[in-house]
Image (tube, grey):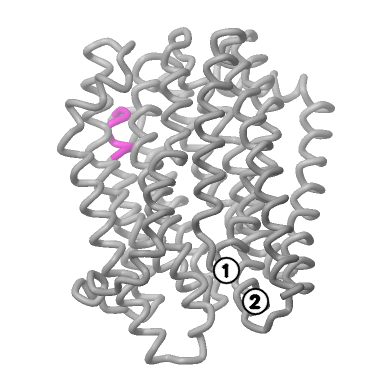
């Protein structure tokens, strides 16, 4: 529990640095076309990193967790994982980068020509940064599997703090383009630092290419995640159709809830996940149930606390948004409303990672993908209805409903799967 608290503090500092950066951007540049373009440029690299790391993690976290006491096998597995990350990540991202002039105007068709050009300009360094972030993600998986959770997060935190200092110093004179290039420098720095911490593992392209069983296990998740993990792009599509500055306002609320969910995930959920594979290897399904349910209980308690804080401190939160960011009262009230409506997203974004991790540890990467695909399609319908009826507040409400529905279905199926294993 002590380690979980320390990780939570480190991740909180890291995410606080990210949030302060975004708030400072809004304060200096303002809510408008350029900040909307910046937020839209962040979307695709973030989605690609999420898809690819999820696919790699689903295979390599359970494998590395059981190889901790076998140094030679561990080193080989690390080099294969790194090789697969380069092949999968660099190939995908370079293709997306080449096609930027085609997909940006199609995806964000309501933007003007100038905004489209800004999105393309900002996307290039962010996509390059995504390549390094994917490699860092695989190294982080290895560090987590060997129970070096804190070290992995400390490096990311230092990178975020250094980036914040540079942005605070230079943004007023240099403009938003500086921010995306700093993101690239941060990604490179974190990757090199994690390589050092991991003992400079080799990158085996040949073995990575030839490791057919891991490719086979990743395939359904990668294909499925390529669809349902594009959910943030759907959100950006709808929010870009809102009033001028709507993308920035909606992103502000999503960013806050996303940061909080990541803190809970890293502090509560991530330390539990390596034990899942060990319990299954020992056929100790009772301890497996207790472990992931304990994590869900902790997440529930934190989310309940967030509800209380949001309700009791609403006037203060709204006033801070007005005073610190220069938002008008209507926009500040809208941010608070979106925050409240995203509580369902907050709960599932954190606790849902436990359910998915158990499925992966059981060797089942298909079920979460199937549920995610169906939920994604249902979610598009809900988001379209919510947005066109209630604008951005309806979109936030639809996101929470979609996430909660996925969580309920996944939990029911997981319980049945564990009970079947236990009784066999």
Magenta residues (range): 175-180
Q: Quadrant of residue 209?
A: bottom left
Q: Are marks 1 and 2 in contact (CB under 8 Å)?
A: yes
> Is the stretch drawn in magenta largely helix, strand or loop?
helix
Secondary element type, mark 1: helix
Residue topped by disc 2: 280
Where 130 falls versus 171 (above or below)? below
Q: Nearer the viewer, residue 127 or 367?
A: 367
Label drawn at residue 240: none
Q: Label 2: how many residues lie within 10 Å, few (<14), some (14-19) or many (20+)?
A: some
Q: Quadrant of residue 189?
A: bottom left
Quarter of the image with the N terminus in it: bottom right
Q: Quadrant of residue 286?
A: bottom right
Report the side of 326 relative to 75 (left or right). right
Report the side of 253 relative to 225 (left or right). right
Report the side of 292 relative to 13 (left or right). right
Secondary element type, mark 2: helix
Residue located 67% across and 77% down the image: 279
Q: Nearer the viewer, residue 167 or 409?
A: 409
Residue topped by disc 1: 361
Residue located 22% across and 38% down the image: 124
Residue located 59% across and 61% down the image: 359
Where 201 falls versus 56 (above or below)? below
**Residue 388 location, x and y as percent?**
54, 9
**Residue 308 location, x and y as percent?**
83, 34
Q: Of the residues under marks 1 and 2, which one precedes in the sequence?
A: 2
**Residue 411 location, x and y as percent?**
70, 51
Tell me, yes or no, whether the highlighted magenta stretch contains residue 176.
yes
Q: Label 1: how many residues lie within 10 Å, few (<14), some (14-19) or many (20+)?
A: many
Where 16 falls versus 281 (above or below)? above
């Amino acid at each position: 529990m002590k380690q979980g608290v320390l990780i939570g503090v480190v991740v909180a500092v890291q995410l606080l640095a990210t949030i302060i950066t975004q708030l400072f951007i809004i304060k200096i540049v303002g809510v408008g076309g350029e900040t909307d373009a910046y937020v839209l440029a962040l979307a695709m690299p973030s989605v690609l990193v999420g898809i690819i790391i999820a696919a790699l993690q689903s295979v390599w976290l359970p494998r590395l967790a059981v190889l901790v006491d076998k140094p030679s096998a561990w080193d080989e597995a690390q080099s294969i994982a790194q090789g697969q990350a380069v092949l999968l990540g660099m190939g995908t991202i370079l293709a997306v980068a080449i096609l930027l002039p085609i997909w940006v105007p199609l995806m964000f068709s309501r933007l003007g020509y100038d905004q489209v050009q800004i999105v393309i300009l900002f996307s290039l360094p962010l996509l390059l940064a995504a390549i390094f972030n994917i490699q860092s993600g695989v190294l982080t998986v290895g560090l987590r599997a060997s129970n070096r959770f804190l070290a992995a997060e400390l490096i990311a935190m230092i990178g975020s703090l250094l980036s914040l200092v540079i942005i605070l110093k230079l943004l007023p004179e240099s403009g938003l383009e500086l921010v995306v290039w700093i993101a690239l420098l941060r990604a490179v720095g974190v990757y090199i630092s994690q390589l050092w911490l991991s003992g400079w593992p080799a990158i085996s392209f040949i073995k990575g290419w030839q490791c057919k069983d891991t490719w086979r296990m990743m395939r359904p998740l990668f294909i499925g995640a390529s669809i349902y993990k594009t959910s943030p792009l759907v959100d950006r599509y709808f929010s870009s159709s809102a009033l001028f500055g709507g993308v920035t306002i909606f992103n502000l609320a999503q960013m806050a809830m996303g940061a909080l969910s990541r803190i809970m995930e890293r502090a509560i959920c991530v330390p539990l996940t390596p034990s899942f594979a060990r319990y299954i290897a020992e056929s100790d399904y009772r301890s497996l149930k207790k472990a992931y349910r304990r994590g869900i209980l902790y997440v529930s308690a934190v989310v309940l606390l967030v509800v209380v804080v949001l309700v009791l401190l609403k006037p203060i939160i709204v006033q801070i948004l007005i005073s610190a960011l220069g938002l008008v009262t209507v926009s500040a009230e809208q941010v608070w409303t979106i925050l409240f409506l995203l509580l369902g997203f907050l709960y599932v974004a954190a606790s849902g990672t436990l359910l998915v991790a158990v499925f992966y540890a059981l060797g089942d990467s298909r079920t979460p993908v199937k549920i995610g695909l169906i939920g994604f399609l249902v979610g598009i319908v809900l988001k379209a209805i919510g947005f066109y009826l209630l604008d951005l507040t309806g979109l936030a409400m639809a996101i929470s409903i979609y996430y909660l529905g996925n969580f309920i279905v996944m939990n029911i199926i997981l319980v049945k799967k564990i009970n079947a294993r236990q009784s066999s």
